[in-house]
Image (tube, rainbow, N blue to C red):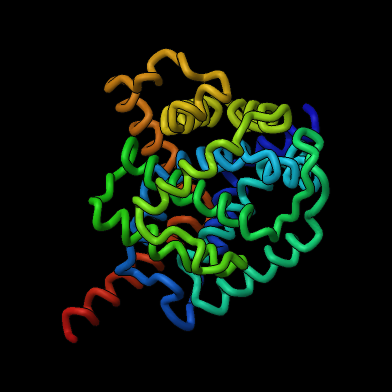
Amino acid sequence: MTAGQQAAAGLVERYAQAYASAVPLAPDDDGFFGPASVTWRVSADLSAPVAGLRALMMQALHPLAMAGVDQHSGWRLDPAGRLAATSGYTTTVAYGDRASAMRAARRVRAIHEHVRGVDTVTGRPYAAGDPALLLWVHAALVDSALAACALFGTPLTGADADRYVSEMAVEAELLGTPREIIPDTAAALRRYLAEVRPELRCTPAAAESVRYLLQLPGLDEGIAELWRDVADAAIAALPRWAREEYGYAAAPGLDPLTPQRRTQIRQALGVLDAVLLGEPGVLEARQRLQLRARAAGGAARRA
C-alpha cells in the first residue's frame, strides 16, 4: 500500500476526530451563528459530505486557486488529512465560540501568507490571500451547501437560503474577504457565480486532484462503496457546465439524476452518518450541540 493509500485509509477516523475535537466542550458564547441559525441546520444536514466534496470540485475549477493547492499542499500524500483539516475548520467556525473561530481563521490566514506563485497554465501570479480568490473559495462552499441540501438533504426555503448566504458572509470576512464584495443573498451569489464563470476551467491539476478525490484508494470495501455514492452525489450536484468541464456530462443515472439513484444516495448518506456516529467522540459532540440547542430554545421561550 502506498503512502497515499495509507492516508486515505484513515478517512473516516480522521474526519470523525476532527469533527469531535472542533465541537467545543464549554464554549464561552454561541459563536458567530448560534443554535437558531440556518448555518447550524445546514452544517448538521446529512448532505454535508456531498457539499464538502462538491465544494472542492468547484474550487478546483479556478486555475489560480487550484495552482495554490497543487503547488503548496500535500494532498497527494495525505488526502484524508486535507479533508479532515477542512472539516475541522468549518466545524470550528460553525459551532465554536467567537474566540475559537477567530483563532482558527488566524491560523488559516497565516498559512495563506506563504501560498503564492505563478500558475503554469495561465501564466498569472496568484496569492491565497487575494480577496478575489478568497471570495471564489467561499462562494463555492456556500453554493455547494445549498445544492447538496436541495438534492440530497433538507431543502431550504428561499428565505432561509438568503439567511444562510447572509450568515456565511461572516466566514468569508474571518479569512480576510472585504464585506462589501461578499454576496449576501442567494440571488447575489448566483450573479457572482455567473460573472466568474468565464475564468473557470479544468486544468490538468484540477482533473488529477478531483479524479483522486472521487476514487480515494485504500478505503476498506464498505467505506469505499459509501464514498462512491458520495462521489456520485457530488457530481450530480454540480452545475451542468462544471460536469462538462470534468467530463461527467453523460454520467448514467446522474445526468439527469434519476429518482432511484437519488434515493440510493440518500440512504447511503444515512449509513455513512451512522458509521461516523460510531467513531469515538462523535456522539458526544452531537449531544453537546443538542443540549446547546435545547438551552437556547428554552431561553427563547422564556424571553
Q: Can you give x and y, in whole percent of width and height, for residue 2 in the image?
A: 80, 29
294, 157: nearer the viewer: 157
Q: Where 21 falls versus 292 (above or below)? A: above
Q: Can you give x and y, in whole percent of width and height, for residue 179 in the image?
A: 51, 69
Residue 226 in view of the camera: no
- At horizontal 27% and vertical 57% (from top left) the residue drawn is 160
Q: Quadrant of the N terminus?
A: top right
Q: Where 39 falls versus 46 (above or below)? A: below
Q: Can you give x and y, in whole percent of width and height, for residue 260 in the image?
A: 29, 20
Residue 7 in view of the camera: yes
Q: Can you give x and y, in whole percent of width and height, for residue 190 in the image?
A: 40, 46
Q: Quadrant of the C terminus?
A: bottom left
Q: Quadrant of residue 185?
A: bottom left
Q: Quadrant of residue 298?
A: bottom left
- At horizontal 64% and vertical 29% (from top left) the residue drawn is 202
**Would residue 127 appear left or right of 233 to someone viewing this image?**
right
279, 70: nearer the viewer: 70
Q: Where 244 falls versus 112 (above or below)? A: above
